[in-house]
Amino acid sequence: MSKKFIYVFIGLIGFAFLATGCNNYTESENNSIITMGRSPKEKLEISDLERENNIKKAVCCIESVENVWVIASGDNIVIGIETYEQNDDNIQRIKFEAKDKAESVDKWADNVSVTTNPNIVEMIKNV
């Protein structure tokens, strides 16, 4: 391989990175949800770890919740809940209350996902 070919190849890779870029937003596959990150000024206001702790404290107060794990990034919140509740209606109530509490304690919580699935909760624990 010639040096010219290597330089062209590296240039094409560099152009691909520039063309796709690292935008402050991403679009989902269905193009209906756009998620925005927080500005540097907002990140100085409160860290993601502090946001996670605030949400965890609020969600832990819900009846039948045993333990909570939270991931906060930009306007995305993922909440994993351990509960011994078996009744589907009560599980749905817990999820709804958790989403409501997350949105009330965190002004950036626009996309909140809540799960009680043990496999997914285990993955959230390991993040």
Image (cartoon, rainbow, N blue to C red):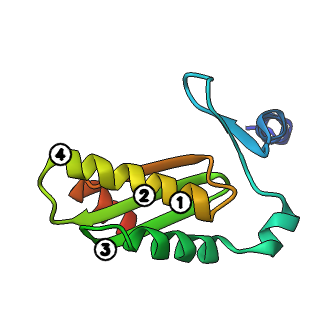
Amino acid type, label 4: Asp
Disc 3 versus disc 4: nearer the observer: 4
| Circle 2 residues within 10 Å: few <14, some 14–19, many ≥20 | many
Q: Nearer the viewer, mark 1 or mark 3?
A: 1
Residue on which disc 3 sits: 67
Residue for badge 1: 102
Callout 3, which amino acid? Asn
Residue 97 as seen in the image, left or right of residue 27? left
The tag on residue 68 is: none
The foreground one among 96 and 28 is 96
**Spatial separation of the CA atoms under disc 3 and disc 2:** 12 Å
Residue assigned mark 2: 98
- As helix, strand or loop, the secondary structure at mark 3 comes to strand
- Of the numbered discs 1 and 3, the one sitting upstream in the chain is 3
Say the numbered circle drawn on residue 88.
Answer: 4
Q: Are marks 2 and 4 in contact (CB under 8 Å)?
A: no
Q: What residue appears at the point 73 percent right and 52 percent down from the top-left corner?
A: 37
Q: Are marks 2 and 1 in contact (CB under 8 Å)?
A: yes
